[in-house]
Image (tube, rainbow, N blue to C red):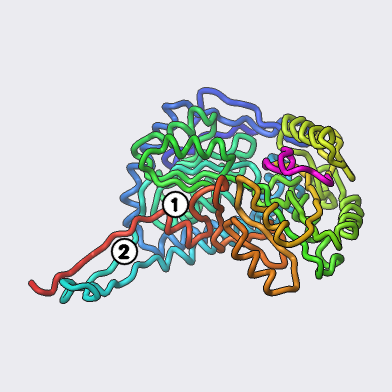
Amino acid sequence: MEKKKLYINGEWVEATSYTTLTSPYSGEPLAEIPVATESDVEQAIEAAYQARNMMAKMPAHKRAAILEKVAEILQERAEEAAQMIALEAAKPITTAKAEVGRTIQTYKFAAEEAKRIHGETIPLDAAPGGENRVAFTVREPIGVIGAITPFNFPMNLVAHKLGPAIAAGNTIVLKPASQTPLSAYFIAELFEQAGLPKGALNVVTGSGKTVGDKLVTDERISMITFTGSPAVGIGIRNKAGLKKVTLELGSNSAVIVDEDVDIDSIIQRCVVGAFSFQGQVCISLQRIYVHEKRYEEFVEKFIAATKQLNVGDPLDPKTDVSALITPNDVERSLQWIEEAKQGGATVAVGGERKGNILLPTVILHARPDMKVSCQEVFAPIVLINKATSIDEAIELVNDSRYGLQAGIYTNNIHVAWEAVEKLQVGGVLINDIPTFRVDHMPYGGVKESGTGREGLRYAIEEMTELKLVIFNRNQ
């Protein structure tokens, strides 16, 4: 079994202790993973801090070339990368391959954006006293970035932290999720091969208490970028002081189905949105509100399509749904399903486990206060409820402490614009599910879904400081 090492200051460093990483699907051991001490984290932060000026002075074309090289090497090793994701995250191999493809695109986008970071000129003579002065802004790298990433997209969400950080000329200390560290160490190898200077990227694995708290509180870290749960994100925000903080904290995303929609044309799309990677996606389709005139038809066809899904080994290309990330998540999901049943909801299909796999589950008539409705399930569970009108459906979508993305299917342009105006989310998708994302679009939410935006250009804005320059021509 392979024994991994910490990656600090361009060196692979032996740790004082290790933990065994096991497959969520089979339980078989995959690798020995280093557990960083506070001293290890200190060394990683210091390495990044010492390298920050070098990275800031690196020309944009060189930063872009490194990112392009990473994308090129990853393309060559795409099959290996997908297998790694499937093993450590139990992500079905077809979905894992799609993630690798997106990761390649993310680094390519980062390389492009590295070459077009710019400011603007400001007409100071628009104000009395501003005559004969020329002003412009420049964007400068913020310094050292602490990146904390989740398990569900272990390669692409790492790319959404590393890509824009390096494009902007920053250095990084990365803490990947405990269940999916292999992808992070793999990417560190690629950056090493691509010629990233020592200290610019450091990868430390270990407990959130040891690694995460040190990153959040250390004064040498200028920004924290985090994807994970609201509870942890709020804790980070409270401890971070004056650091910049970008938080992507998940959701219980919803779609509305209007009465004029061709149901057959959207069923498969909705099923994919609900059950892709076992529902362990921040914008997974968790709630569906269907106009009462089409409700029965939608439910019947959705259930029929759900029953066609294949569950099993993530390495099998035919598998649609595999194991949840931990057995505890299976237990929690079953408890939430039972709570819904006891409260009067109907489990139309699923609601059972098969080993560490939770079978795709459809729940009808769930109340808004049930956990399967008001919390983020992060499991293959979707509820379908009836709405008497679009206004009621919008109110139901908004009755949430989250607000990442929401979708609406309608053929009525007026209804679509009403949804755009009234839905309290970071992104509204017309005639699509909320689970849609491409990697250069602005991505983020409102309410407890977080602060700031990802998407390469938008993340670079978060990871740079704006500096104003004024020339006085009167002297």
Give the camera-side residue of 217 and 265.
Answer: 265
Q: Callout 2, which amino acid?
A: Val
Task: Classify residue 137 as left or right of residue 328.
Answer: left
Indicate whether 127 appears above or below 371: below
Was residue 306 drawn as part of the magenta stretch in this picture?
Answer: no
Q: Callout 1, which amino acid?
A: Leu
Which residue is depicted at the point 68% across and 44% down?
84
Q: CA distance from mark 1 to mark 2?
A: 24 Å
Q: Position of residue 341 (x, y in %)?
A: 84, 36
Q: Which mark is residue 138?
A: 2
Which residue is depicted at the point 78% across and 44% down?
381
Which residue is depicted at the point 90% across and 57% down?
296
Q: Position of residue 272 (x, y in %)?
A: 78, 56
Quadrant of the drawing holding the N terminus: top right
Which residue is depicted at the point 78% across and 56% down?
387
Query: Considering the numbered disc 2 on the image, is that residue within a helix, a strand or a loop?
Result: strand
Earlier in the chain: of badge 1 and badge 2, it is 2
Q: Which mark is residue 196?
A: 1
Give the camera-side residue of 348 and 41.
Answer: 348
Was residue 369 drawn as part of the magenta stretch in this picture?
Answer: yes
Magenta segment range?
363-376
Indicate whether 128 appears above or below 396: below
Q: Residues within 10 Å of mark 1 (few under 14, many from 20)?
A: many
Query: Considering the numbered disc 1 on the image, is that residue within a helix, a strand or a loop?
Result: loop
Indicate whether 442 appears above or below 363: below
Q: Position of residue 313 (x, y in %)?
A: 82, 42
Q: Residues within 10 Å of mark 2 (few under 14, many from 20)?
A: some
Can the viewer see residue 249? yes
Can the viewer see residue 72? no
Give the camera-side residue of 214 and 53.
Answer: 214
Q: Which mark is residue 44?
A: none
Indicate whether 114 appears above or below 77: below
